[in-house]
Amino acid sequence: MLLNKHLNSYGWEILVDFTPREVQIASQRENIMRKLLTAAIFAISAAQASAMCVGSGALTSCTDTQGNSYTVNRFGNTTITNGHNAGTGSSWSQTDMSVGNSVYTNGNTNGNSWNMQRHHHGSGLSTYSGTDSRGDSFMGTCTQFGCN
């Protein structure tokens, strides 16, 4: 087993135990998810040159130059994102719900569920916790200087 610093889909580092093969697979999946989420965040932006998007602020559908696709559906305090990786055939989804200073996220990658709660405490301090797609718990704290 290898203790690895792992970036989740929000770019926060968490420590996770992986075998070397699992590190490579997790790294590939997280890299794909990070790219898709980054594209989803900027889907409405005119600066987003790598994806062709159609829709409005409430519903946007995009396809990038590699054939990956995703939709972002926003209503009230909830955002639902669904994506498909053309290269691997994998799919993922996540639902984010904002309540006050907290964001609750539930996701699914190829049938494996995960969740995370983020709480913003002000002055650049936030905490997060959840369960990854393997069923392992994680938690941490972020400041303006980074996350642990």
Image: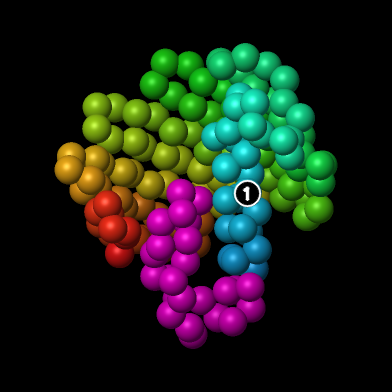
Q: Residue at x 81, y 46 (%)?
A: 66
Q: Amino acid at mark 1?
A: Lys
Q: Is residue 126 magenta?
A: no
Q: Residue at x 64, y 32 (%)?
A: 47
Of residues 64 and 29, the one drawn nearer to the viewer in this rendering: 64
Query: How many numbered dots are placed on residues in this image?
Result: 1
Q: Is residue 6 magenta?
A: yes
Left or right: 87 in relation to 111: right
Question: Is residue 53 visible to the viewer in this orientation of the structure?
Answer: yes
In the rendered view, tell whether residue 55 sits above or below residue 16: above
Q: Position of residue 71 (x, y in %)?
A: 65, 29
Residue lying furthest bottom in this view? Answer: 1
* Side of 8 relative to 59 (left or right): left
Give percent across and percent down for residue 50.
Answer: 73, 39
Residue annotated with mark 1: 35
In the image shown, does 60 or 19 lie closer to the viewer? 60
Place of residue 140 in the rendered image (x, y in percent of width and height, measured from the top left): 28, 59
From this viewpoint, is residue 43 visible?
no
Q: In the picture shown, does residue 14 fall above or below 107?
A: below
At 66% across and 34% down in the image, what residue appears? 48
Residue 144: image x %, image y %?
A: 27, 52
Name the quadrant of the C terminus: bottom left
- Please tell me in which quadrant of the rendered image residue 45 appears: top right
Q: Which residues are magenta?
A: 1-24
Q: Residue at x 67, y 39 (%)?
A: 83
Coloring scheme used: rainbow
Rate crowding at label 1 as few (under 14), some (14 to 19) or many (20 or more) other CA atoms within 10 Å.
few
Circle 1 — which element? helix
